[in-house]
Image (cartoon, rainbow, N blue to C red):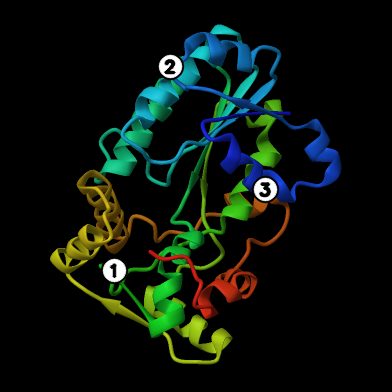
Amino acid sequence: MRALVRNPAKAKVVFADLPPDAADRLEIVDGDFGDVQLLQRAFDGVGSVFLALGTSTQQIAFEKALIDAAAHVRVGQVVRLSVLGASQQGGYEVARRHGELDDYLAASGVAHTLLRPAYFMSNLLFAAASIASAGRWYGLVPSARIAMIDTRDVADAAHAVLGDPARQNVSYDLTGPASLTFAEVAGRFTALLGRPIQYVPIDEATMRQGYAKRGVPDWLADIALGIEHAMQAGRHAALTPALERLIGRPARSIDDFIRDHQSAFSSSTAPSA
């Protein structure tokens, strides 16, 4: 098992909780995703690749380089983490980025599987400090329903499809078990934390000012606001059965997520947004 990373120190923290048998089999490869020869060496002898890169100004270039390297050494399968509604004609930037990359992977000739999850429950952790200290968090989505998903379930879905020929050249739209408004999520926080928690709708200008105060670059603020508008437009509302079929069990609920991360939403040391 080989992990190609840009930040080995961060990777060691991420992989610290691996079971001993998995940790013993893990090889961390540190390198520049723009280094074609390094990428080809990293993929040499690899049967399946899980491709998951975070949003950055270089995401498209990096992922295309990774796909090219996988095609060059004839990797057996690439499982790519995309997004629900990915399309080059999508209504917001993240959907368009992932649509371009999904199409590029399909055109590469590499056998592939696309995982297209809805909004991550873990995004709530960006509001953990506000929830912990003030009992509220803010956003642009006052009424829309969101079929949010736990990233641990996404990881389990990736595990289910990696190396499975029956799952190749297929895309899966993945959602959690319920489509909830943020007001309803606040209600679950209230019930589980034992104190009042509110979701407070604000306008785009106010939210953009908040990003600027925290030093969030304009390009990233634009992407975040685009996701908020997409959710309010209902683009992450519909539920699908794909996740439970892949992992063979019910998806984790918002209650499961809050319970498992309760300390983050209760502590003064909660991660700041």
Residue 116 vs 75, above or below: the answer is: below
Nearest the eye: 127 or 60: 127
Badge 2: residue crowd in 10 Å (few <14, some 14–19, many ≥20)? few
What residue is rendered at 39% in x and 76% in y?
Answer: 130
- Give SS at disc 3: helix
Image quarter hosting the N terminus: top right
Disc sitting over residue 269 in the figure:
none
Q: CA distance from mark 1 to mark 3?
A: 28 Å
Q: Which residue is mark 2?
A: 107
Q: Position of residue 192 (x, y in %)?
A: 57, 85
Q: Residue at x 22, y 62 (%)?
A: 213
N-terminal-most mark, 1 or 3: 1
Q: Nearer the viewer, mark 2 or mark 3?
A: 3
Q: Is residue 145 visible?
A: yes
Q: Is residue 205 above or below residue 69?
A: below
The label on residue 156 is 3
Residue type indicated by callout 3: Asp
Give the mark nearer the N terminus: 2 vs 3.
Answer: 2
Give the answer, above or below, for where 72 lies relative to 16: above
Could you classify mark 3 by the number of other residues whose Cα lies within 10 Å: few (under 14), some (14-19), or many (20 or more)?
Answer: some
The residue wearing badge 1 is 141
